[in-house]
Image: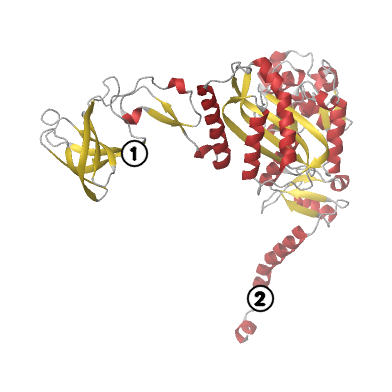
Amino acid sequence: AAEQREQPAAEQRKLHAAEQPKLHAAERKRSSRAPVNPARPFVIAEASETAPCIVAVNPAAADAGLAPGMRLADARARLGSLQVRQDDPMADTAALERLAHWATRYTPSVALFKAESGTDGLFLDITGAAHLLGGEENLLADLAERLDAANLPARIAVAETPGAAWALAHFARTNRAILPAGTEANALAPLPIEALRLDPATAVTLRRLGLKRVGMLLGQHRAPFAARFEKELLLRLDRALGRAPEPLAFLTPPPAYTQIRTLLEPIDSEEAIVAVATRLMDDLVPRLETDGKGARALRLTLYRVDGAAHEIPFGLALPTRSPEHVARLLRLRLERHARSLEAGFGFETLRLSVTVVEAMAPRQRTLARSDETERTRRCTRLHDALRQRLGPQSVRHLAPVESHLPERSQISCMTPDDASSWPAFETAQPRPPLLLAHPEPANVVALVPDGPPLRIRWRGTLSTIARTQGPERIAAEWWRDGADAPTRDYYLVEDGTGRRLWLYREGIPGRETTDARWFVHGLFP
Protein backbone atom coordinates (compact mmCIF):
# COMPACT_ATOMS: atom_id res chain seq x y z
CA ALA A 1 0.00 0.00 0.00
CA ALA A 2 2.86 2.33 0.78
CA GLU A 3 4.45 1.63 -2.60
CA GLN A 4 1.17 2.37 -4.39
CA ARG A 5 0.88 5.72 -2.59
CA GLU A 6 4.39 6.63 -3.72
CA GLN A 7 3.61 6.03 -7.43
CA PRO A 8 3.71 9.17 -9.55
CA ALA A 9 0.44 10.65 -10.67
CA ALA A 10 1.31 9.97 -14.33
CA GLU A 11 1.74 6.28 -13.58
CA GLN A 12 -1.61 6.20 -11.78
CA ARG A 13 -3.27 7.83 -14.76
CA LYS A 14 -1.64 5.20 -17.00
CA LEU A 15 -3.04 2.37 -14.91
CA HIS A 16 -6.45 4.00 -14.88
CA ALA A 17 -6.39 4.31 -18.66
CA ALA A 18 -5.36 0.66 -18.99
CA GLU A 19 -8.37 -0.39 -16.94
CA GLN A 20 -10.83 1.44 -19.20
CA PRO A 21 -10.88 -1.20 -22.00
CA LYS A 22 -11.64 -3.88 -19.43
CA LEU A 23 -14.58 -1.86 -18.14
CA HIS A 24 -15.91 -1.34 -21.68
CA ALA A 25 -15.53 -5.07 -22.38
CA ALA A 26 -17.49 -5.88 -19.24
CA GLU A 27 -20.22 -3.45 -20.28
CA ARG A 28 -20.41 -5.04 -23.75
CA LYS A 29 -20.61 -8.48 -22.18
CA ARG A 30 -23.47 -7.40 -19.91
CA SER A 31 -25.29 -5.74 -22.81
CA SER A 32 -24.97 -8.86 -24.97
CA ARG A 33 -26.80 -10.86 -22.33
CA ALA A 34 -29.70 -8.40 -22.15
CA PRO A 35 -32.66 -9.21 -24.43
CA VAL A 36 -33.10 -7.10 -27.54
CA ASN A 37 -36.01 -4.66 -27.57
CA PRO A 38 -37.35 -4.64 -31.16
CA ALA A 39 -38.98 -1.26 -30.62
CA ARG A 40 -35.58 0.39 -30.13
CA PRO A 41 -32.82 0.79 -32.72
CA PHE A 42 -30.84 -2.44 -33.02
CA VAL A 43 -27.91 -3.24 -35.33
CA ILE A 44 -25.53 -6.12 -36.03
CA ALA A 45 -21.92 -5.06 -36.46
CA GLU A 46 -18.79 -6.77 -37.73
CA ALA A 47 -16.64 -8.65 -35.23
CA SER A 48 -13.72 -6.26 -35.63
CA GLU A 49 -11.66 -4.39 -33.07
CA THR A 50 -10.87 -1.50 -35.44
CA ALA A 51 -13.64 0.57 -37.01
CA PRO A 52 -16.39 -2.09 -37.23
CA CYS A 53 -19.21 -1.45 -39.71
CA ILE A 54 -22.89 -2.22 -39.47
CA VAL A 55 -24.03 -5.39 -41.23
CA ALA A 56 -27.80 -5.29 -40.62
CA VAL A 57 -30.37 -2.98 -38.98
CA ASN A 58 -33.89 -3.42 -37.67
CA PRO A 59 -36.78 -1.17 -38.79
CA ALA A 60 -36.36 1.16 -35.79
CA ALA A 61 -32.70 1.70 -36.65
CA ALA A 62 -33.53 2.24 -40.32
CA ASP A 63 -36.10 4.89 -39.39
CA ALA A 64 -33.38 6.61 -37.36
CA GLY A 65 -31.19 6.90 -40.46
CA LEU A 66 -28.88 3.94 -39.92
CA ALA A 67 -28.00 1.64 -42.81
CA PRO A 68 -25.70 -1.33 -43.49
CA GLY A 69 -22.15 -0.24 -44.28
CA MET A 70 -22.18 2.69 -41.83
CA ARG A 71 -19.43 2.77 -39.24
CA LEU A 72 -20.57 1.72 -35.79
CA ALA A 73 -18.84 4.73 -34.18
CA ASP A 74 -20.83 7.11 -36.38
CA ALA A 75 -24.07 5.31 -35.51
CA ARG A 76 -23.32 5.57 -31.78
CA ALA A 77 -22.52 9.26 -32.17
CA ARG A 78 -25.83 9.84 -33.95
CA LEU A 79 -28.13 7.94 -31.57
CA GLY A 80 -26.15 7.50 -28.39
CA SER A 81 -28.21 4.61 -27.02
CA LEU A 82 -27.95 1.74 -29.49
CA GLN A 83 -28.42 -2.00 -29.16
CA VAL A 84 -25.49 -3.80 -30.80
CA ARG A 85 -24.66 -7.47 -31.38
CA GLN A 86 -21.63 -8.90 -33.15
CA ASP A 87 -22.00 -10.62 -36.49
CA ASP A 88 -21.72 -14.44 -36.45
CA PRO A 89 -21.73 -15.73 -40.05
CA MET A 90 -21.43 -19.38 -39.02
CA ALA A 91 -24.47 -19.16 -36.77
CA ASP A 92 -26.41 -17.35 -39.52
CA THR A 93 -25.57 -20.08 -42.04
CA ALA A 94 -26.57 -22.81 -39.60
CA ALA A 95 -29.89 -21.08 -38.89
CA LEU A 96 -30.53 -20.64 -42.61
CA GLU A 97 -29.82 -24.32 -43.20
CA ARG A 98 -32.31 -25.28 -40.49
CA LEU A 99 -34.88 -23.05 -42.15
CA ALA A 100 -34.08 -24.70 -45.51
CA HIS A 101 -34.69 -28.17 -44.03
CA TRP A 102 -38.00 -26.92 -42.68
CA ALA A 103 -38.92 -25.50 -46.12
CA THR A 104 -38.65 -28.98 -47.69
CA ARG A 105 -42.20 -29.51 -46.42
CA TYR A 106 -43.28 -27.58 -49.53
CA THR A 107 -40.80 -29.05 -52.03
CA PRO A 108 -37.76 -31.32 -51.73
CA SER A 109 -35.75 -28.94 -53.96
CA VAL A 110 -34.49 -26.13 -51.69
CA ALA A 111 -31.28 -24.14 -52.22
CA LEU A 112 -29.58 -21.44 -50.16
CA PHE A 113 -28.80 -18.03 -51.59
CA LYS A 114 -25.18 -17.80 -52.66
CA ALA A 115 -22.79 -15.03 -51.69
CA GLU A 116 -23.71 -12.90 -54.69
CA SER A 117 -27.38 -13.27 -53.75
CA GLY A 118 -26.88 -11.85 -50.28
CA THR A 119 -27.05 -15.16 -48.34
CA ASP A 120 -30.29 -13.96 -46.76
CA GLY A 121 -32.88 -16.33 -48.15
CA LEU A 122 -33.86 -19.51 -49.96
CA PHE A 123 -34.76 -20.69 -53.45
CA LEU A 124 -37.68 -23.15 -53.55
CA ASP A 125 -38.34 -24.99 -56.79
CA ILE A 126 -42.09 -25.59 -56.51
CA THR A 127 -42.49 -27.07 -59.98
CA GLY A 128 -44.97 -29.93 -59.61
CA ALA A 129 -45.44 -29.26 -55.89
CA ALA A 130 -47.77 -26.24 -55.76
CA HIS A 131 -50.86 -28.30 -56.53
CA LEU A 132 -50.42 -30.21 -53.26
CA LEU A 133 -51.51 -27.06 -51.41
CA GLY A 134 -54.11 -25.94 -53.91
CA GLY A 135 -51.95 -23.78 -56.17
CA GLU A 136 -49.25 -21.16 -55.95
CA GLU A 137 -51.38 -18.60 -54.12
CA ASN A 138 -52.30 -21.03 -51.36
CA LEU A 139 -48.70 -22.19 -51.05
CA LEU A 140 -47.51 -18.60 -50.82
CA ALA A 141 -50.13 -17.76 -48.20
CA ASP A 142 -49.32 -20.82 -46.09
CA LEU A 143 -45.59 -20.13 -46.25
CA ALA A 144 -46.03 -16.48 -45.27
CA GLU A 145 -48.39 -17.37 -42.43
CA ARG A 146 -45.97 -19.90 -40.93
CA LEU A 147 -43.03 -17.51 -41.19
CA ASP A 148 -45.02 -14.74 -39.54
CA ALA A 149 -46.01 -17.10 -36.73
CA ALA A 150 -42.32 -17.83 -36.15
CA ASN A 151 -41.49 -14.08 -36.06
CA LEU A 152 -39.53 -14.33 -39.30
CA PRO A 153 -40.57 -11.42 -41.53
CA ALA A 154 -40.01 -12.37 -45.15
CA ARG A 155 -40.57 -11.13 -48.68
CA ILE A 156 -41.73 -13.87 -51.05
CA ALA A 157 -42.03 -13.95 -54.81
CA VAL A 158 -42.90 -16.65 -57.36
CA ALA A 159 -41.48 -16.49 -60.87
CA GLU A 160 -40.33 -18.75 -63.68
CA THR A 161 -36.63 -17.98 -63.09
CA PRO A 162 -34.61 -17.74 -59.85
CA GLY A 163 -33.25 -14.36 -60.93
CA ALA A 164 -36.70 -12.83 -61.44
CA ALA A 165 -37.98 -14.28 -58.16
CA TRP A 166 -34.98 -12.85 -56.29
CA ALA A 167 -35.43 -9.42 -57.87
CA LEU A 168 -39.12 -9.23 -56.98
CA ALA A 169 -38.55 -10.52 -53.45
CA HIS A 170 -35.99 -7.77 -52.79
CA PHE A 171 -37.27 -4.80 -54.80
CA ALA A 172 -40.99 -5.25 -55.47
CA ARG A 173 -43.43 -2.88 -53.80
CA THR A 174 -45.31 -5.71 -52.11
CA ASN A 175 -44.06 -8.43 -49.78
CA ARG A 176 -45.74 -11.13 -51.87
CA ALA A 177 -45.69 -11.33 -55.64
CA ILE A 178 -46.62 -13.95 -58.23
CA LEU A 179 -45.24 -13.25 -61.70
CA PRO A 180 -47.00 -14.91 -64.66
CA ALA A 181 -44.77 -16.74 -67.11
CA GLY A 182 -43.50 -14.64 -70.01
CA THR A 183 -43.82 -11.27 -68.24
CA GLU A 184 -40.32 -11.18 -66.74
CA ALA A 185 -39.11 -8.27 -68.89
CA ASN A 186 -42.06 -6.02 -68.04
CA ALA A 187 -41.81 -6.82 -64.32
CA LEU A 188 -38.05 -6.24 -64.11
CA ALA A 189 -37.95 -3.08 -66.19
CA PRO A 190 -38.88 -0.58 -63.41
CA LEU A 191 -36.61 -2.22 -60.81
CA PRO A 192 -33.19 -0.75 -59.92
CA ILE A 193 -30.09 -2.16 -61.55
CA GLU A 194 -29.14 -3.92 -58.27
CA ALA A 195 -32.04 -6.32 -58.87
CA LEU A 196 -29.79 -8.27 -61.25
CA ARG A 197 -27.50 -9.35 -58.35
CA LEU A 198 -24.53 -7.54 -59.84
CA ASP A 199 -21.18 -6.87 -58.27
CA PRO A 200 -21.29 -3.55 -56.34
CA ALA A 201 -18.55 -2.07 -58.54
CA THR A 202 -20.48 -2.99 -61.69
CA ALA A 203 -23.68 -1.45 -60.30
CA VAL A 204 -21.85 1.80 -59.43
CA THR A 205 -20.36 2.02 -62.93
CA LEU A 206 -23.75 1.50 -64.56
CA ARG A 207 -25.30 4.23 -62.43
CA ARG A 208 -22.53 6.62 -63.39
CA LEU A 209 -23.37 5.91 -67.03
CA GLY A 210 -27.01 6.78 -66.34
CA LEU A 211 -28.27 3.18 -66.43
CA LYS A 212 -30.22 3.08 -63.18
CA ARG A 213 -33.07 0.76 -64.11
CA VAL A 214 -33.13 -2.75 -65.57
CA GLY A 215 -35.39 -1.53 -68.36
CA MET A 216 -32.58 0.71 -69.63
CA LEU A 217 -30.56 -2.41 -70.50
CA LEU A 218 -33.38 -4.12 -72.35
CA GLY A 219 -33.27 -3.68 -76.10
CA GLN A 220 -29.72 -2.28 -76.07
CA HIS A 221 -26.93 -3.65 -78.25
CA ARG A 222 -24.99 -6.27 -76.31
CA ALA A 223 -21.58 -5.70 -77.89
CA PRO A 224 -20.72 -2.47 -75.98
CA PHE A 225 -21.70 -4.07 -72.66
CA ALA A 226 -19.69 -7.20 -73.41
CA ALA A 227 -16.64 -5.08 -74.22
CA ARG A 228 -16.94 -2.76 -71.22
CA PHE A 229 -18.10 -5.10 -68.46
CA GLU A 230 -17.45 -8.63 -67.36
CA LYS A 231 -19.70 -11.37 -68.72
CA GLU A 232 -21.50 -11.34 -65.36
CA LEU A 233 -23.73 -8.44 -66.46
CA LEU A 234 -25.22 -10.08 -69.55
CA LEU A 235 -25.32 -13.49 -67.87
CA ARG A 236 -27.36 -12.16 -64.95
CA LEU A 237 -29.73 -10.41 -67.33
CA ASP A 238 -30.20 -13.53 -69.47
CA ARG A 239 -30.80 -15.72 -66.43
CA ALA A 240 -33.37 -13.35 -64.98
CA LEU A 241 -35.25 -13.26 -68.30
CA GLY A 242 -35.04 -17.03 -68.80
CA ARG A 243 -32.70 -16.87 -71.79
CA ALA A 244 -29.97 -18.84 -69.98
CA PRO A 245 -30.34 -21.60 -67.38
CA GLU A 246 -29.37 -20.98 -63.77
CA PRO A 247 -28.36 -24.16 -61.91
CA LEU A 248 -29.13 -24.28 -58.20
CA ALA A 249 -27.20 -26.22 -55.56
CA PHE A 250 -30.04 -27.89 -53.70
CA LEU A 251 -29.69 -28.83 -50.07
CA THR A 252 -30.27 -32.49 -50.96
CA PRO A 253 -30.47 -34.08 -54.41
CA PRO A 254 -34.05 -34.16 -55.71
CA PRO A 255 -35.56 -37.59 -55.02
CA ALA A 256 -36.76 -39.86 -57.78
CA TYR A 257 -40.19 -40.23 -56.13
CA THR A 258 -41.72 -38.42 -53.18
CA GLN A 259 -45.00 -38.37 -51.31
CA ILE A 260 -46.06 -35.98 -48.53
CA ARG A 261 -48.96 -35.94 -46.09
CA THR A 262 -50.07 -33.17 -43.71
CA LEU A 263 -51.99 -34.41 -40.69
CA LEU A 264 -54.96 -32.80 -39.00
CA GLU A 265 -53.53 -33.63 -35.57
CA PRO A 266 -49.81 -33.97 -34.75
CA ILE A 267 -48.48 -37.43 -33.91
CA ASP A 268 -45.61 -38.40 -31.63
CA SER A 269 -45.69 -42.20 -31.24
CA GLU A 270 -43.62 -44.71 -33.15
CA GLU A 271 -46.67 -46.72 -34.19
CA ALA A 272 -48.36 -43.66 -35.71
CA ILE A 273 -45.21 -42.65 -37.62
CA VAL A 274 -44.83 -46.15 -39.07
CA ALA A 275 -48.52 -46.27 -40.01
CA VAL A 276 -48.37 -42.96 -41.89
CA ALA A 277 -45.11 -43.95 -43.61
CA THR A 278 -46.70 -47.23 -44.71
CA ARG A 279 -49.59 -45.34 -46.32
CA LEU A 280 -47.10 -43.05 -48.07
CA MET A 281 -45.28 -46.10 -49.46
CA ASP A 282 -48.63 -47.51 -50.60
CA ASP A 283 -49.16 -44.31 -52.60
CA LEU A 284 -45.72 -44.65 -54.23
CA VAL A 285 -46.10 -48.30 -55.27
CA PRO A 286 -48.28 -47.67 -58.38
CA ARG A 287 -45.79 -45.15 -59.74
CA LEU A 288 -42.89 -47.53 -59.10
CA GLU A 289 -44.72 -50.40 -60.79
CA THR A 290 -45.56 -48.27 -63.82
CA ASP A 291 -41.89 -47.37 -64.30
CA GLY A 292 -40.61 -50.86 -63.50
CA LYS A 293 -38.53 -49.53 -60.60
CA GLY A 294 -37.88 -50.53 -57.02
CA ALA A 295 -36.71 -48.49 -54.04
CA ARG A 296 -33.11 -49.05 -52.93
CA ALA A 297 -32.80 -46.07 -50.58
CA LEU A 298 -35.48 -43.98 -48.88
CA ARG A 299 -35.64 -40.93 -46.63
CA LEU A 300 -38.44 -40.15 -44.20
CA THR A 301 -38.63 -36.50 -43.15
CA LEU A 302 -40.60 -35.58 -40.04
CA TYR A 303 -41.68 -31.95 -39.61
CA ARG A 304 -42.40 -30.87 -36.06
CA VAL A 305 -44.98 -28.31 -35.06
CA ASP A 306 -42.27 -25.90 -33.90
CA GLY A 307 -40.59 -25.94 -37.33
CA ALA A 308 -37.75 -28.44 -36.73
CA ALA A 309 -37.24 -31.18 -39.32
CA HIS A 310 -35.78 -34.65 -38.73
CA GLU A 311 -34.49 -36.84 -41.56
CA ILE A 312 -34.33 -40.63 -41.25
CA PRO A 313 -32.50 -42.20 -44.22
CA PHE A 314 -32.34 -45.97 -44.66
CA GLY A 315 -31.22 -48.26 -47.46
CA LEU A 316 -32.14 -51.72 -48.69
CA ALA A 317 -30.07 -54.62 -49.93
CA LEU A 318 -32.24 -55.19 -53.00
CA PRO A 319 -34.92 -53.03 -54.66
CA THR A 320 -38.38 -53.43 -53.20
CA ARG A 321 -41.93 -52.20 -53.59
CA SER A 322 -43.26 -53.82 -50.44
CA PRO A 323 -44.81 -51.37 -47.94
CA GLU A 324 -44.64 -54.05 -45.23
CA HIS A 325 -40.91 -54.50 -45.71
CA VAL A 326 -40.32 -50.75 -45.62
CA ALA A 327 -42.43 -50.44 -42.47
CA ARG A 328 -40.44 -53.21 -40.78
CA LEU A 329 -37.12 -51.52 -41.55
CA LEU A 330 -38.43 -48.12 -40.50
CA ARG A 331 -39.56 -49.53 -37.15
CA LEU A 332 -36.05 -50.88 -36.53
CA ARG A 333 -34.57 -47.54 -37.56
CA LEU A 334 -36.82 -45.63 -35.17
CA GLU A 335 -35.89 -47.96 -32.31
CA ARG A 336 -32.22 -47.27 -32.98
CA HIS A 337 -32.72 -43.46 -33.03
CA ALA A 338 -35.32 -43.29 -30.26
CA ARG A 339 -33.10 -41.18 -27.98
CA SER A 340 -32.04 -38.64 -30.61
CA LEU A 341 -35.53 -38.20 -32.08
CA GLU A 342 -37.36 -35.55 -30.09
CA ALA A 343 -41.04 -35.29 -30.96
CA GLY A 344 -41.68 -32.09 -29.01
CA PHE A 345 -45.33 -31.13 -29.54
CA GLY A 346 -45.60 -33.73 -32.30
CA PHE A 347 -45.06 -34.10 -36.04
CA GLU A 348 -47.61 -32.46 -38.30
CA THR A 349 -46.20 -33.35 -41.73
CA LEU A 350 -44.38 -36.45 -43.05
CA ARG A 351 -42.60 -36.85 -46.37
CA LEU A 352 -41.33 -40.17 -47.77
CA SER A 353 -38.81 -39.84 -50.59
CA VAL A 354 -37.24 -42.56 -52.72
CA THR A 355 -33.70 -41.30 -53.25
CA VAL A 356 -32.24 -44.30 -55.13
CA VAL A 357 -34.12 -46.60 -57.50
CA GLU A 358 -33.17 -49.65 -59.54
CA ALA A 359 -34.87 -51.63 -62.24
CA MET A 360 -37.10 -54.34 -60.80
CA ALA A 361 -38.31 -57.15 -63.02
CA PRO A 362 -41.90 -58.38 -62.60
CA ARG A 363 -42.27 -61.41 -60.32
CA GLN A 364 -44.83 -64.18 -60.12
CA ARG A 365 -47.26 -63.73 -57.25
CA THR A 366 -50.00 -66.33 -57.74
CA LEU A 367 -47.94 -69.53 -57.93
CA ALA A 368 -45.73 -70.85 -55.15
CA ARG A 369 -42.23 -69.44 -55.00
CA SER A 370 -39.25 -71.70 -55.57
CA ASP A 371 -36.96 -72.59 -52.70
CA GLU A 372 -34.17 -70.47 -54.18
CA THR A 373 -36.42 -67.42 -54.49
CA GLU A 374 -37.67 -67.84 -50.94
CA ARG A 375 -34.11 -68.22 -49.63
CA THR A 376 -32.99 -65.05 -51.44
CA ARG A 377 -35.96 -63.12 -50.09
CA ARG A 378 -35.31 -64.22 -46.51
CA CYS A 379 -31.59 -63.45 -46.75
CA THR A 380 -32.36 -60.01 -48.12
CA ARG A 381 -34.75 -59.23 -45.28
CA LEU A 382 -32.21 -60.43 -42.73
CA HIS A 383 -29.53 -58.27 -44.36
CA ASP A 384 -31.78 -55.19 -44.26
CA ALA A 385 -32.77 -55.81 -40.63
CA LEU A 386 -29.13 -56.13 -39.55
CA ARG A 387 -28.20 -52.91 -41.35
CA GLN A 388 -30.93 -50.98 -39.54
CA ARG A 389 -29.95 -52.48 -36.18
CA LEU A 390 -26.15 -52.28 -36.45
CA GLY A 391 -25.66 -49.54 -39.04
CA PRO A 392 -24.93 -49.75 -42.78
CA GLN A 393 -21.15 -49.82 -42.24
CA SER A 394 -21.36 -52.79 -39.86
CA VAL A 395 -22.81 -55.31 -42.32
CA ARG A 396 -20.80 -56.65 -45.22
CA HIS A 397 -21.54 -59.09 -48.01
CA LEU A 398 -19.17 -61.26 -50.03
CA ALA A 399 -19.05 -60.96 -53.81
CA PRO A 400 -17.16 -63.32 -56.12
CA VAL A 401 -14.12 -62.34 -58.20
CA GLU A 402 -12.69 -64.34 -61.09
CA SER A 403 -9.40 -65.44 -59.53
CA HIS A 404 -8.05 -68.77 -58.26
CA LEU A 405 -5.88 -67.11 -55.63
CA PRO A 406 -7.74 -67.35 -52.30
CA GLU A 407 -7.19 -63.73 -51.26
CA ARG A 408 -8.46 -62.49 -54.63
CA SER A 409 -11.44 -64.81 -55.15
CA GLN A 410 -13.91 -62.64 -53.21
CA ILE A 411 -14.36 -59.10 -51.99
CA SER A 412 -16.37 -57.48 -49.21
CA CYS A 413 -19.10 -55.11 -50.39
CA MET A 414 -22.04 -53.22 -48.94
CA THR A 415 -24.85 -54.88 -50.96
CA PRO A 416 -25.48 -58.58 -51.62
CA ASP A 417 -25.01 -60.08 -55.05
CA ASP A 418 -27.30 -62.56 -56.70
CA ALA A 419 -26.32 -66.16 -55.86
CA SER A 420 -26.14 -67.03 -59.56
CA SER A 421 -23.09 -64.81 -59.95
CA TRP A 422 -20.94 -67.22 -57.93
CA PRO A 423 -18.99 -69.85 -59.90
CA ALA A 424 -20.99 -73.01 -60.49
CA PHE A 425 -17.99 -75.37 -60.20
CA GLU A 426 -16.49 -76.62 -56.96
CA THR A 427 -12.79 -77.00 -56.25
CA ALA A 428 -11.34 -80.43 -55.61
CA GLN A 429 -10.02 -79.26 -52.26
CA PRO A 430 -12.16 -77.66 -49.54
CA ARG A 431 -11.91 -73.98 -48.70
CA PRO A 432 -11.87 -72.61 -45.14
CA PRO A 433 -14.89 -70.54 -44.04
CA LEU A 434 -12.52 -68.13 -42.25
CA LEU A 435 -9.71 -66.66 -44.36
CA LEU A 436 -7.15 -64.54 -42.53
CA ALA A 437 -6.74 -60.97 -43.72
CA HIS A 438 -3.03 -61.64 -44.31
CA PRO A 439 -1.19 -64.99 -44.30
CA GLU A 440 0.63 -65.36 -40.97
CA PRO A 441 4.14 -66.87 -40.86
CA ALA A 442 4.58 -70.20 -39.05
CA ASN A 443 7.53 -72.47 -38.16
CA VAL A 444 6.90 -75.90 -39.71
CA VAL A 445 8.91 -79.13 -39.56
CA ALA A 446 8.44 -81.17 -42.76
CA LEU A 447 10.26 -83.84 -44.74
CA VAL A 448 12.76 -82.53 -47.26
CA PRO A 449 12.32 -81.60 -50.02
CA ASP A 450 8.51 -81.49 -50.36
CA GLY A 451 7.06 -83.68 -47.66
CA PRO A 452 3.90 -82.85 -45.68
CA PRO A 453 4.09 -80.85 -42.43
CA LEU A 454 4.78 -82.85 -39.26
CA ARG A 455 4.96 -80.18 -36.55
CA ILE A 456 3.93 -76.53 -36.47
CA ARG A 457 4.54 -73.54 -34.19
CA TRP A 458 1.99 -70.77 -34.80
CA ARG A 459 1.07 -67.84 -32.58
CA GLY A 460 3.44 -69.12 -29.89
CA THR A 461 1.88 -72.60 -29.69
CA LEU A 462 3.75 -75.78 -30.70
CA SER A 463 1.61 -78.71 -31.85
CA THR A 464 2.05 -82.00 -33.67
CA ILE A 465 0.22 -82.70 -36.92
CA ALA A 466 -2.09 -85.69 -36.62
CA ARG A 467 -3.71 -85.70 -40.07
CA THR A 468 -2.81 -84.08 -43.40
CA GLN A 469 -4.69 -83.59 -46.67
CA GLY A 470 -2.96 -82.18 -49.73
CA PRO A 471 -1.06 -80.69 -51.33
CA GLU A 472 -3.04 -78.42 -53.65
CA ARG A 473 -0.68 -76.43 -55.85
CA ILE A 474 -1.72 -72.88 -56.81
CA ALA A 475 0.52 -70.78 -59.03
CA ALA A 476 0.51 -67.03 -59.50
CA GLU A 477 -1.71 -65.62 -62.26
CA TRP A 478 0.55 -64.78 -65.20
CA TRP A 479 -1.79 -62.11 -66.61
CA ARG A 480 -1.71 -59.94 -63.47
CA ASP A 481 0.86 -58.04 -61.50
CA GLY A 482 2.98 -60.32 -59.34
CA ALA A 483 3.16 -63.13 -61.88
CA ASP A 484 6.68 -63.94 -60.67
CA ALA A 485 5.44 -64.77 -57.14
CA PRO A 486 6.46 -68.22 -55.82
CA THR A 487 4.17 -71.20 -56.20
CA ARG A 488 2.09 -72.28 -53.20
CA ASP A 489 1.39 -75.81 -51.94
CA TYR A 490 -1.70 -75.77 -49.69
CA TYR A 491 -2.37 -78.37 -46.96
CA LEU A 492 -5.35 -79.01 -44.73
CA VAL A 493 -3.92 -80.22 -41.40
CA GLU A 494 -5.33 -81.21 -38.04
CA ASP A 495 -3.23 -81.18 -34.87
CA GLY A 496 -3.56 -83.30 -31.73
CA THR A 497 -6.08 -80.92 -30.14
CA GLY A 498 -8.46 -81.11 -33.09
CA ARG A 499 -7.62 -77.67 -34.48
CA ARG A 500 -7.78 -77.61 -38.30
CA LEU A 501 -5.61 -75.16 -40.23
CA TRP A 502 -5.19 -74.28 -43.88
CA LEU A 503 -1.52 -73.54 -44.51
CA TYR A 504 0.80 -73.42 -47.48
CA ARG A 505 4.46 -73.72 -48.34
CA GLU A 506 5.76 -70.83 -50.46
CA GLY A 507 8.14 -71.82 -53.25
CA ILE A 508 8.97 -75.20 -54.80
CA PRO A 509 12.11 -76.57 -53.06
CA GLY A 510 15.03 -77.02 -55.41
CA ARG A 511 13.46 -75.03 -58.27
CA GLU A 512 12.15 -71.72 -56.87
CA THR A 513 13.80 -71.60 -53.46
CA THR A 514 16.26 -73.42 -51.23
CA ASP A 515 14.56 -72.45 -47.97
CA ALA A 516 10.77 -72.73 -48.26
CA ARG A 517 8.60 -70.66 -45.92
CA TRP A 518 5.27 -71.66 -44.38
CA PHE A 519 2.18 -69.54 -43.77
CA VAL A 520 -1.22 -70.11 -42.15
CA HIS A 521 -3.93 -68.72 -44.44
CA GLY A 522 -7.25 -69.93 -43.02
CA LEU A 523 -9.11 -71.81 -40.29
CA PHE A 524 -11.66 -74.65 -40.43
CA PRO A 525 -14.35 -75.18 -37.77
Residue annotated with mark 2: 12
Label 1 packing within 10 angstroms: few (<14), some (14-19), many (20+): few
Instruction: Give the amino acid type for the residue marked by disc 2 in the picture.
Output: Gln
Q: Which percent across, then down, holds residue 316?
A: 58, 30
**Does dot 2 land on a helix, a strand or a loop?**
helix
Sequence-wise, which precedes: disc 2 or disc 1? Answer: 2
Distance between the alpha carbons at the discs numbered 2 and 1: 77 Å
- Write down the quadrant of residue 2 in the picture: bottom right
Res 436 label: 1
Label 2 packing within 10 angstroms: few (<14), some (14-19), many (20+): few
Farthest residue, direction bottom: 2
- From the viewer's side, name the closer residue of 101 and 491: 491
Q: Which percent across, then down, holds residue 502?
A: 28, 36
* Quadrant location of the N terminus in the rendered image: bottom right
- Write down the quadrant of residue 479 in the picture: top left
- From the viewer's side, name the closer residue of 287 and 251: 287
- Residue depth check, mark 2 versus mark 1: number of the one nearer the observer: 1
Instruction: Give the amino acid type for the residue marked by disc 1 in the picture.
Output: Leu
Give the mark count.
2
Q: Which percent across, then down, holds residue 289?
A: 67, 18
Q: Is residue 234 visible?
A: no
